[in-house]
Amino acid sequence: MRVLFTSKMDGEISSFHPYSFQEIVVLTAELDAKLKKKNAKPMMLDFMIFNEEGDKLYNGSYEVGAEGTSNIYDHVWQKLLELPMENKNEETKRDVFLQQLTSNTPASYQMDMTEVLKEKEVQKSSWKQLGKRSKIFVSVISTTLMVAIASCITLLILLSNQGKDLRAITQELERMEGVKTAYEGYWTGEQGEAVEQLLGMETLTESERQTLLHFLIELKKYDQALQYAGKENTSSLAEQVMKVHGLEELMSFQEAYPSPLGEFKIAFHHGEYKHAVGIQDMAMSPQLYKQKGIAYLRLDQLEDAKKMASEAKDDGLNKKINEYQEIEEQLTKINSQIETEKKSEDQKQSKIDSLKEQQEGLESQKNNL
Protein backbone atom coordinates (compact mmCIF):
# COMPACT_ATOMS: atom_id res chain seq x y z
CA MET A 1 0.00 0.00 0.00
CA ARG A 2 1.40 3.39 -1.03
CA VAL A 3 0.71 7.02 -0.09
CA LEU A 4 1.24 9.90 -2.53
CA PHE A 5 1.10 13.51 -1.30
CA THR A 6 0.11 16.29 -3.68
CA SER A 7 1.27 18.90 -1.18
CA LYS A 8 4.50 18.91 0.78
CA MET A 9 6.09 19.77 4.12
CA ASP A 10 9.48 21.30 3.42
CA GLY A 11 12.35 19.16 4.64
CA GLU A 12 9.98 16.47 5.91
CA ILE A 13 7.44 15.22 3.34
CA SER A 14 7.89 15.44 -0.43
CA SER A 15 5.04 15.78 -2.91
CA PHE A 16 4.53 13.09 -5.55
CA HIS A 17 6.88 10.67 -3.81
CA PRO A 18 5.42 7.16 -3.33
CA TYR A 19 5.78 6.40 0.40
CA SER A 20 4.86 3.05 1.87
CA PHE A 21 1.90 3.30 4.25
CA GLN A 22 3.97 1.89 7.13
CA GLU A 23 6.67 4.51 6.54
CA ILE A 24 4.23 7.42 6.42
CA VAL A 25 2.39 6.38 9.58
CA VAL A 26 5.63 6.60 11.57
CA LEU A 27 6.71 9.82 9.85
CA THR A 28 3.40 11.63 10.40
CA ALA A 29 3.33 10.46 14.02
CA GLU A 30 6.77 11.99 14.60
CA LEU A 31 5.87 15.24 12.81
CA ASP A 32 2.56 15.50 14.65
CA ALA A 33 4.30 15.13 18.02
CA LYS A 34 6.95 17.67 17.02
CA LEU A 35 4.40 20.33 15.98
CA LYS A 36 2.31 19.84 19.11
CA LYS A 37 5.37 20.07 21.34
CA LYS A 38 6.28 23.43 19.78
CA ASN A 39 2.62 24.58 19.76
CA ALA A 40 3.16 25.20 16.06
CA LYS A 41 0.36 25.88 13.59
CA PRO A 42 -0.99 22.62 12.07
CA MET A 43 -0.13 21.98 8.41
CA MET A 44 -2.60 20.64 5.83
CA LEU A 45 -1.40 17.85 3.52
CA ASP A 46 -3.45 16.46 0.61
CA PHE A 47 -2.86 12.78 -0.05
CA MET A 48 -4.00 9.66 -1.90
CA ILE A 49 -3.74 5.99 -0.89
CA PHE A 50 -3.14 3.33 -3.55
CA ASN A 51 -2.90 -0.44 -3.45
CA GLU A 52 0.04 -2.29 -5.02
CA GLU A 53 -1.81 -2.56 -8.35
CA GLY A 54 -2.15 1.22 -8.61
CA ASP A 55 -5.85 1.42 -7.68
CA LYS A 56 -6.70 4.58 -5.75
CA LEU A 57 -8.41 3.51 -2.53
CA TYR A 58 -8.78 6.82 -0.73
CA ASN A 59 -7.99 10.52 -1.05
CA GLY A 60 -8.29 13.25 1.53
CA SER A 61 -6.56 15.98 3.52
CA TYR A 62 -4.68 15.40 6.77
CA GLU A 63 -3.89 18.24 9.18
CA VAL A 64 -0.54 17.42 10.81
CA GLY A 65 -0.40 18.70 14.38
CA ALA A 66 -4.17 19.18 14.76
CA GLU A 67 -5.93 18.20 17.96
CA GLY A 68 -7.67 14.86 18.02
CA THR A 69 -5.38 12.88 15.69
CA SER A 70 -1.82 11.63 16.01
CA ASN A 71 -0.90 10.22 12.57
CA ILE A 72 -2.36 9.61 9.11
CA TYR A 73 -3.65 6.14 10.06
CA ASP A 74 -5.45 7.62 13.07
CA HIS A 75 -6.89 10.35 10.80
CA VAL A 76 -8.33 7.94 8.20
CA TRP A 77 -9.84 5.75 10.93
CA GLN A 78 -11.68 8.74 12.36
CA LYS A 79 -12.94 9.91 8.98
CA LEU A 80 -14.31 6.52 7.99
CA LEU A 81 -15.86 5.79 11.40
CA GLU A 82 -17.65 9.16 11.24
CA LEU A 83 -18.90 8.42 7.71
CA PRO A 84 -22.63 7.49 7.73
CA MET A 85 -23.29 4.03 6.28
CA GLU A 86 -26.54 3.23 4.44
CA ASN A 87 -26.60 -0.45 5.28
CA LYS A 88 -24.70 -3.42 6.68
CA ASN A 89 -23.00 -4.02 3.35
CA GLU A 90 -21.43 -0.57 3.39
CA GLU A 91 -20.30 -1.07 6.99
CA THR A 92 -18.59 -4.30 5.93
CA LYS A 93 -16.79 -2.54 3.09
CA ARG A 94 -15.58 0.16 5.49
CA ASP A 95 -14.41 -2.41 8.03
CA VAL A 96 -12.50 -4.34 5.36
CA PHE A 97 -10.63 -1.19 4.36
CA LEU A 98 -9.84 -0.37 8.00
CA GLN A 99 -8.49 -3.89 8.45
CA GLN A 100 -6.31 -3.47 5.38
CA LEU A 101 -4.96 -0.18 6.73
CA THR A 102 -4.21 -1.81 10.05
CA SER A 103 -2.35 -4.70 8.44
CA ASN A 104 -0.08 -2.13 6.77
CA THR A 105 0.55 -0.22 10.02
CA PRO A 106 3.40 -0.86 12.51
CA ALA A 107 2.12 -2.83 15.50
CA SER A 108 2.73 -0.06 18.04
CA TYR A 109 0.33 2.25 16.16
CA GLN A 110 -2.41 -0.27 15.37
CA MET A 111 -5.97 0.02 16.64
CA ASP A 112 -7.84 -3.04 17.88
CA MET A 113 -10.68 -2.94 15.38
CA THR A 114 -12.88 -5.41 17.24
CA GLU A 115 -12.65 -3.38 20.42
CA VAL A 116 -13.13 -0.04 18.70
CA LEU A 117 -16.26 -1.06 16.81
CA LYS A 118 -17.68 -2.72 19.92
CA GLU A 119 -17.26 0.42 21.98
CA LYS A 120 -18.52 2.62 19.18
CA GLU A 121 -21.71 0.59 19.00
CA VAL A 122 -22.32 0.12 22.73
CA GLN A 123 -20.93 3.23 24.40
CA LYS A 124 -20.31 5.62 21.46
CA SER A 125 -17.18 6.72 23.28
CA SER A 126 -15.08 9.55 21.88
CA TRP A 127 -12.01 8.95 19.66
CA LYS A 128 -9.83 10.66 22.23
CA GLN A 129 -10.79 8.06 24.82
CA LEU A 130 -10.21 5.26 22.35
CA GLY A 131 -6.73 6.59 21.63
CA LYS A 132 -5.67 5.68 25.17
CA ARG A 133 -6.56 2.04 24.71
CA SER A 134 -4.14 -0.66 23.75
CA LYS A 135 -3.37 -0.34 20.04
CA ILE A 136 -2.72 -3.98 19.30
CA PHE A 137 -4.44 -5.48 16.26
CA VAL A 138 -5.55 -9.06 17.04
CA SER A 139 -7.57 -9.97 13.93
CA VAL A 140 -6.21 -12.01 11.01
CA ILE A 141 -7.30 -10.79 7.55
CA SER A 142 -8.45 -13.46 5.16
CA THR A 143 -7.24 -13.65 1.58
CA THR A 144 -10.81 -13.20 0.35
CA LEU A 145 -11.20 -9.85 2.12
CA MET A 146 -7.86 -8.60 0.81
CA VAL A 147 -8.94 -9.36 -2.77
CA ALA A 148 -12.41 -7.87 -2.29
CA ILE A 149 -11.18 -4.50 -1.08
CA ALA A 150 -9.92 -3.37 -4.50
CA SER A 151 -13.37 -3.64 -6.05
CA CYS A 152 -15.50 -2.32 -3.19
CA ILE A 153 -13.66 0.54 -1.50
CA THR A 154 -14.08 2.97 -4.39
CA LEU A 155 -17.85 2.52 -4.18
CA LEU A 156 -17.65 3.09 -0.43
CA ILE A 157 -16.07 6.51 -0.97
CA LEU A 158 -18.55 7.43 -3.69
CA LEU A 159 -21.51 6.57 -1.48
CA SER A 160 -20.30 8.87 1.29
CA ASN A 161 -22.60 11.57 -0.08
CA GLN A 162 -26.02 10.17 0.74
CA GLY A 163 -27.77 12.49 -1.73
CA LYS A 164 -26.19 11.04 -4.87
CA ASP A 165 -28.44 9.07 -7.17
CA LEU A 166 -27.34 5.97 -9.02
CA ARG A 167 -26.66 7.83 -12.26
CA ALA A 168 -24.41 10.36 -10.55
CA ILE A 169 -22.58 7.57 -8.75
CA THR A 170 -22.05 5.70 -12.02
CA GLN A 171 -20.69 8.83 -13.72
CA GLU A 172 -18.31 9.50 -10.84
CA LEU A 173 -17.14 5.90 -10.87
CA GLU A 174 -16.41 6.16 -14.59
CA ARG A 175 -14.49 9.39 -14.03
CA MET A 176 -12.37 7.86 -11.27
CA GLU A 177 -11.71 4.79 -13.40
CA GLY A 178 -10.48 7.14 -16.15
CA VAL A 179 -8.13 8.89 -13.73
CA LYS A 180 -6.88 5.54 -12.43
CA THR A 181 -6.20 4.32 -15.97
CA ALA A 182 -4.29 7.52 -16.76
CA TYR A 183 -2.15 7.19 -13.62
CA GLU A 184 -1.36 3.58 -14.42
CA GLY A 185 -0.43 4.55 -17.96
CA TYR A 186 1.89 7.28 -16.76
CA TRP A 187 3.68 5.00 -14.31
CA THR A 188 4.07 2.23 -16.88
CA GLY A 189 5.67 4.42 -19.56
CA GLU A 190 2.75 5.88 -21.53
CA GLN A 191 3.27 9.39 -20.17
CA GLY A 192 2.13 11.38 -23.19
CA GLU A 193 -1.11 9.43 -23.61
CA ALA A 194 -1.82 9.61 -19.88
CA VAL A 195 -1.41 13.40 -19.80
CA GLU A 196 -3.66 13.89 -22.83
CA GLN A 197 -6.27 11.68 -21.20
CA LEU A 198 -6.24 13.78 -18.01
CA LEU A 199 -6.29 17.05 -19.96
CA GLY A 200 -9.35 15.83 -21.85
CA MET A 201 -11.36 15.14 -18.68
CA GLU A 202 -14.04 17.70 -17.84
CA THR A 203 -13.59 17.57 -14.07
CA LEU A 204 -10.65 16.75 -11.81
CA THR A 205 -10.33 17.09 -8.06
CA GLU A 206 -7.73 19.51 -6.72
CA SER A 207 -5.38 16.64 -5.90
CA GLU A 208 -5.78 15.26 -9.42
CA ARG A 209 -5.15 18.72 -10.90
CA GLN A 210 -1.90 19.01 -8.94
CA THR A 211 -0.87 15.54 -10.09
CA LEU A 212 -1.53 16.50 -13.72
CA LEU A 213 0.55 19.67 -13.35
CA HIS A 214 3.37 17.61 -11.86
CA PHE A 215 3.22 15.27 -14.86
CA LEU A 216 3.35 18.22 -17.28
CA ILE A 217 6.36 19.71 -15.47
CA GLU A 218 8.11 16.36 -15.37
CA LEU A 219 7.62 16.00 -19.14
CA LYS A 220 8.70 19.65 -19.68
CA LYS A 221 5.37 20.47 -21.34
CA TYR A 222 5.52 23.99 -19.98
CA ASP A 223 3.16 25.62 -22.49
CA GLN A 224 0.43 23.15 -21.57
CA ALA A 225 1.16 23.53 -17.85
CA LEU A 226 0.82 27.32 -18.04
CA GLN A 227 -2.29 27.08 -20.16
CA TYR A 228 -3.82 24.69 -17.63
CA ALA A 229 -2.71 26.48 -14.45
CA GLY A 230 -2.94 30.06 -15.76
CA LYS A 231 -0.11 32.56 -16.29
CA GLU A 232 -0.79 34.01 -12.84
CA ASN A 233 0.66 30.77 -11.43
CA THR A 234 3.98 30.99 -13.30
CA SER A 235 5.90 31.41 -10.02
CA SER A 236 4.35 28.24 -8.61
CA LEU A 237 5.34 26.32 -11.75
CA ALA A 238 8.87 27.74 -11.56
CA GLU A 239 9.20 26.32 -8.05
CA GLN A 240 8.11 22.90 -9.31
CA VAL A 241 10.59 23.08 -12.20
CA MET A 242 13.37 23.77 -9.70
CA LYS A 243 12.31 20.86 -7.53
CA VAL A 244 11.84 18.34 -10.38
CA HIS A 245 14.65 19.33 -12.78
CA GLY A 246 17.08 21.52 -10.83
CA LEU A 247 18.67 24.94 -11.22
CA GLU A 248 19.88 24.66 -14.81
CA GLU A 249 16.42 23.80 -16.11
CA LEU A 250 14.90 26.58 -14.01
CA MET A 251 17.22 29.05 -15.72
CA SER A 252 15.93 27.93 -19.12
CA PHE A 253 12.34 28.07 -17.86
CA GLN A 254 12.91 31.58 -16.49
CA GLU A 255 14.10 32.83 -19.88
CA ALA A 256 10.92 31.63 -21.55
CA TYR A 257 8.48 32.19 -18.69
CA PRO A 258 9.89 34.87 -16.34
CA SER A 259 8.52 35.21 -12.81
CA PRO A 260 9.65 36.92 -9.58
CA LEU A 261 10.06 33.59 -7.78
CA GLY A 262 12.14 32.13 -10.60
CA GLU A 263 14.33 35.22 -10.56
CA PHE A 264 14.76 34.95 -6.79
CA LYS A 265 15.66 31.25 -6.84
CA ILE A 266 18.33 31.79 -9.50
CA ALA A 267 19.82 34.84 -7.78
CA PHE A 268 19.87 33.08 -4.40
CA HIS A 269 21.55 29.93 -5.69
CA HIS A 270 24.15 32.03 -7.55
CA GLY A 271 24.99 33.94 -4.38
CA GLU A 272 23.58 37.22 -5.71
CA TYR A 273 22.01 38.00 -2.35
CA LYS A 274 21.59 41.76 -2.74
CA HIS A 275 19.64 41.20 -5.93
CA ALA A 276 17.63 38.36 -4.36
CA VAL A 277 16.35 40.30 -1.35
CA GLY A 278 15.31 43.19 -3.59
CA ILE A 279 12.90 41.10 -5.67
CA GLN A 280 9.27 42.02 -5.01
CA ASP A 281 5.80 40.62 -5.76
CA MET A 282 6.44 37.07 -4.54
CA ALA A 283 3.85 35.02 -2.68
CA MET A 284 5.89 34.25 0.41
CA SER A 285 6.13 30.77 1.93
CA PRO A 286 8.09 29.49 4.96
CA GLN A 287 10.81 28.24 2.58
CA LEU A 288 11.10 31.65 0.87
CA TYR A 289 11.23 33.46 4.21
CA LYS A 290 14.03 31.10 5.25
CA GLN A 291 16.02 31.69 2.07
CA LYS A 292 15.58 35.46 2.32
CA GLY A 293 16.74 35.24 5.93
CA ILE A 294 19.89 33.41 4.86
CA ALA A 295 20.46 36.01 2.12
CA TYR A 296 20.22 38.81 4.66
CA LEU A 297 22.76 37.02 6.87
CA ARG A 298 25.14 36.82 3.91
CA LEU A 299 24.71 40.59 3.55
CA ASP A 300 25.39 41.15 7.28
CA GLN A 301 21.86 42.52 7.73
CA LEU A 302 21.09 40.75 10.99
CA GLU A 303 17.87 42.55 11.91
CA ASP A 304 16.30 41.82 8.53
CA ALA A 305 17.35 38.19 8.90
CA LYS A 306 15.61 38.05 12.29
CA LYS A 307 12.41 39.41 10.73
CA MET A 308 12.49 36.65 8.13
CA ALA A 309 13.10 34.04 10.86
CA SER A 310 10.02 35.23 12.77
CA GLU A 311 7.94 34.73 9.63
CA ALA A 312 9.52 31.40 8.66
CA LYS A 313 9.24 29.92 12.17
CA ASP A 314 12.20 27.75 11.22
CA ASP A 315 14.51 26.26 13.87
CA GLY A 316 17.33 25.90 11.35
CA LEU A 317 17.32 29.60 10.45
CA ASN A 318 17.16 30.63 14.12
CA LYS A 319 20.16 28.40 14.80
CA LYS A 320 22.12 30.06 11.97
CA ILE A 321 21.27 33.50 13.35
CA ASN A 322 22.46 32.50 16.83
CA GLU A 323 25.70 31.09 15.37
CA TYR A 324 26.14 34.29 13.36
CA GLN A 325 25.82 36.42 16.50
CA GLU A 326 28.29 34.24 18.40
CA ILE A 327 30.81 34.51 15.56
CA GLU A 328 30.36 38.29 15.42
CA GLU A 329 31.08 38.53 19.15
CA GLN A 330 34.23 36.44 18.73
CA LEU A 331 35.35 38.58 15.77
CA THR A 332 34.83 41.76 17.77
CA LYS A 333 36.93 40.33 20.59
CA ILE A 334 39.72 39.22 18.21
CA ASN A 335 39.73 42.58 16.40
CA SER A 336 40.15 44.28 19.75
CA GLN A 337 43.03 41.95 20.67
CA ILE A 338 44.76 42.67 17.35
CA GLU A 339 44.48 46.43 17.85
CA THR A 340 45.75 46.12 21.42
CA GLU A 341 48.73 44.02 20.32
CA LYS A 342 49.60 46.49 17.54
CA LYS A 343 49.74 49.32 20.07
CA SER A 344 51.82 47.34 22.53
CA GLU A 345 55.44 48.43 23.05
CA ASP A 346 56.64 44.82 22.84
CA GLN A 347 54.45 44.01 19.87
CA LYS A 348 54.67 40.36 18.77
CA GLN A 349 54.00 39.78 15.10
CA SER A 350 53.55 36.03 15.67
CA LYS A 351 50.65 36.72 18.04
CA ILE A 352 49.06 39.11 15.54
CA ASP A 353 49.41 36.53 12.78
CA SER A 354 47.82 33.88 14.99
CA LEU A 355 44.89 36.17 15.78
CA LYS A 356 44.44 36.97 12.11
CA GLU A 357 44.31 33.26 11.30
CA GLN A 358 41.54 32.86 13.86
CA GLN A 359 39.83 35.88 12.33
CA GLU A 360 39.93 34.35 8.84
CA GLY A 361 38.59 31.05 10.15
CA LEU A 362 35.64 32.76 11.80
CA GLU A 363 34.92 34.80 8.66
CA SER A 364 34.88 31.58 6.69
CA GLN A 365 32.45 30.00 9.18
CA LYS A 366 30.20 33.03 8.96
CA ASN A 367 30.14 32.91 5.16
CA ASN A 368 29.23 29.23 5.20
CA LEU A 369 26.31 29.49 7.58
Image (spheres, rainbow, N blue to C red):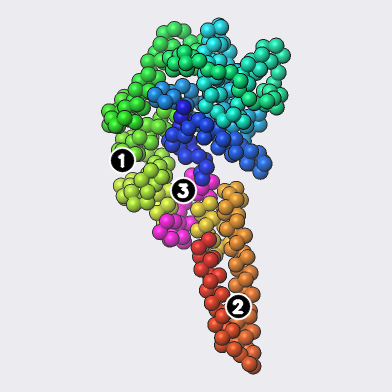
On the image, the x and y values in percent for residue 321 come to 59, 59
Label 1 crowd (10 A; few <14 / some 14-19 / many >=20) = some
Extreme residue toward the bottom, this view? 345
Secondary structure state at the residue bearing disc 1: loop
Secondary structure state at the residue bearing disc 3: loop
Residue displayed at 43% across by 14% down: 151
Q: Amino acid at mark 1?
A: Lys
Left or right, 216 with respect to 126, comes to left
**Which residue corresponds to mark 3?**
281
Asked if one can make out residue 76 in the rendered structure from this viewpoint, the answer is: yes
Q: Amino acid at mark 2?
A: Asn
Residue displayed at 41% across by 39% down: 233
When asked about the image quadrant of residue 235, the answer is top left
Measure the C-alpha gap from mark 1 to mark 2: 53 Å
Q: Amino acid at mark 3?
A: Asp
**Which residue corresponds to mark 1?**
220
Residue displayed at 40% across by 49% down: 262
Q: Are marks 3 and 1 in contact (CB under 8 Å)?
A: no
Mark 3 or mark 2, whichever is nearer to me: 2
Label 2 crowd (10 A; few <14 / some 14-19 / many >=20) = some
Q: 322 above or below 174?
A: below
Question: Which comes before the other along the chain, label 3 or label 1?
Answer: 1
What are the residue bounds of the magenta stretch?
Answer: 268-289
**Which residue corresponds to mark 2?**
335
On the image, the x and y values in percent for residue 84 come to 58, 13
Measure the C-alpha gap from mark 3 to mark 1: 25 Å
